[in-house]
Image (tube, rainbow, N blue to C red):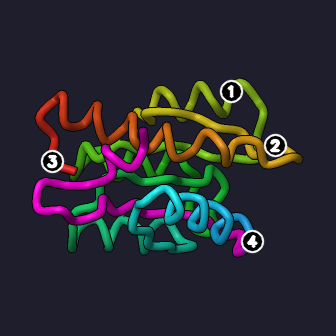
Amino acid sequence: MVSKTTLLAAGERATVLVVEDEPSVAMLESEILERAGFAVEQVALGRRALAILEARDVAVVIADYTMPDMNGADFVAALRGRSEVPVIAVTGHSDPAVERRMREAGVFDFFVKDAGLRFLKELPEAVAAAIAAGRATGRRP
């Protein structure tokens, strides 16, 4: 169950950083994750997300592929130079080349924003799995 994996050692909620420039999608992603017990922070720009990740720890990053200042693969590549925090890609691009590029950059999971927003139902479990995988490899959420 998600709620068991969202708590950290001191009883704190795991924080998810949502990097999404579409306000309605960012709101929906944040709402579903908060309902699942996660603390959520939102930003619209990849560079802003990188600055946040320099300043503090988050358990998981959910990143869009198309951001105003960079694409998701470039964001993950820049992040990997400083952190191994798990990244889940959520994008409107159903192009297999985009998924391949994101996976090669090192994302933990990849979702396409479908018209019915079905991906939102799977997002909390994917975040919990990313946190568990990070713990298994010794990364601190």
Which quadrant holds residue 20?
Answer: bottom right
Q: Earlier in the sequence, mark 4 or mark 2?
A: 4
Disc 3 marks a residue whose amino acid type is: Arg
**Circle 3 residues within 10 Å: few <14, some 14–19, many ≥20:** some
Disc 2 marks a residue whose amino acid type is: Asp
- Of the pair 105 and 2, the residue shown nearer to us: 2
Question: Are circles 2 and 1 on residues that touch, CB within 8 Å?
Answer: no
Q: Would you say residue 16 sits in the magenta stretch?
A: yes
Q: Which mark is residue 97?
A: 1
Q: Residue at x 71, y 69 (%)?
A: 22
101 lies above or below 123: above
Q: Residue at x 66, y 34 (%)?
A: 98
Task: Give left or right: position of 123 versus 4.
Answer: right
Disc 4 marks a residue whose amino acid type is: Ser
**Range shown magenta:** 1-23
Q: Nearer the viewer, mark 1 or mark 3?
A: 3
Q: Earlier in the sequence, mark 1 or mark 3?
A: 1
Q: Nearer the viewer, mark 2 or mark 1?
A: 2
Disc 1 marks a residue whose amino acid type is: Ala
**Circle 4 residues within 10 Å: few <14, some 14–19, many ≥20:** few
